Image: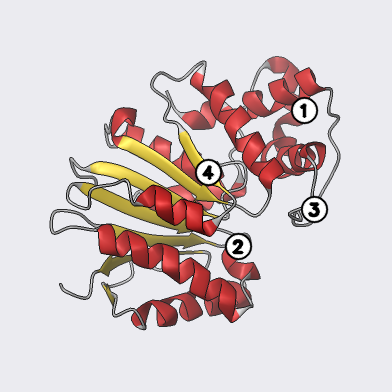
């Protein structure tokens, strides 16, 4: 069962139970936003196009990030390893949903998938866990979420994994467009570097990014700054996997390889 076919309904069910009304919210969510605000933001950006079909029980409209991330994930080959997905700027978990649908398409059991995420909004993380539990009622073996708002906690959580036999996919969304501060790039690079360090000889590590828009100068600048910072760690890089205006993917190698 694909997550894509279920997450709109999960959003509406939560809103109905909590009596939260739809309300357009175009702008980014601050760290101080409350749960109702992040719920309305998520519903507007993920589910609003299918509102008119709500009463027919049709929840099929994919989120734009889903539409852009899924094609590039299709270029990601599968192995028999454990698959760890790290979503930086995870929000409610759109990229995790894409990752699970990719795993399904590659016949990777969810018992071999682990989901990690980082977001500055605790309310958004709370929503991600609620959505996860909603989806787990219908999707067998739905993985647990390891979503946090603290970079150090995320890095500590990654320490629990054996480098041999684990593949890593690190994903960036709109947060890369917003990363104008060099300190942000350094924080992001530290997460990627840890995943690369954990990559063993039988594993692989891939970095992916998806723009919130079809094309923006900020996205390209953020991507290049990130790659430049990774080079300072000695991380080696493969050839980009068919770079597109709104999506990037590249394989990363430890300095020793």
| Cβ–Cβ under 8 Å for marks 3 and 2 | no
Look at the numbered disc 1 and give the secondary structure of its residue: helix
Residue pictured at 79% horizontal, 22% vertical:
18
| Cα gap from disc 3 to disc 2, whole angstroms | 15 Å
Q: Which residue is mark 3?
A: 26
Mark linked to residue 113? none
Q: Check contact, mark 4 vs mark 3: CB within 8 A.
A: no
Mark on residue 52?
1
Badge 1 vs badge 2, beta-carbon distance below 8 Å: no
Residue corresponding to mark 4: 147
**CB within 8 Å, label 2 to label 4:** no
Which quarter of the image is occupied by the C terminus?
bottom left
- Return the disc, 1 or 3, that comes first in the chain's sequence: 3
Q: Which residue is mark 2?
A: 175
Question: Against 135, is 119 above or below?
Answer: below
Front one among 157 and 21 = 157
What separation in Å lies between label 4 and label 3 (alpha carbons)? 24 Å
Residue situated in front as seen by the camera: 206 or 84 = 84
Category of crowding for the residue at label 1, using alpha-carbon neighbours closer than 10 angstroms: few (below 14), some (14–19), many (at least 20): few
Residue at 50% in and 21% down:
136
């Amino acid at each position: 069962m694909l997550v894509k076919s279920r997450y709109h309904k999960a959003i509406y069910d939560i809103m109905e139970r909590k009596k939260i009304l739809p309300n357009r919210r175009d702008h980014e969510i601050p760290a101080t936003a409350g749960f109702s605000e992040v719920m309305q933001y998520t519903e507007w950006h993920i589910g609003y196009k299918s509102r008119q079909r709500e009463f027919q029980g049709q929840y099929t409209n994919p989120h734009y990030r889903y539409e852009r991330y899924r094609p590039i994930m299709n270029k990601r080959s599968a192995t028999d390893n454990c698959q760890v997905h790290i979503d930086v700027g995870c929000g409610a978990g759109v990229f995790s949903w894409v990752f699970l649908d990719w795993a399904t398409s590659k016949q990777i059991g969810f018992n071999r998938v682990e989901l990690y995420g980082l977001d500055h909004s605790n309310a958004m993380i709370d929503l991600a866990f609620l959505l996860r539990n909603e989806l787990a009622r219908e999707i067998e073996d739905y993985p647990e979420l390891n979503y946090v708002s603290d970079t150090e906690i995320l890095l500590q959580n990654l320490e629990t994994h054996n480098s041999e036999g684990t593949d890593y996919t690190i994903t960036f969304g709109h947060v890369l467009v917003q990363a104008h501060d060099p300190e942000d790039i350094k924080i992001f690079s530290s997460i990627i570097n840890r995943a690369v360090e954990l990559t063993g000889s039988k594993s692989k590590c891939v970095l992916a990014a998806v723009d919130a828009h079809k094309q923006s100068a900020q996205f390209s600048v953020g991507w290049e700054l990130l790659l430049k910072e990774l080079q300072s760690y000695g991380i080696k890089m493969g050839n980009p996997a068919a770079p597109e205006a709104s999506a990037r993917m590249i394989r990363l190698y430890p300095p020793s390889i």
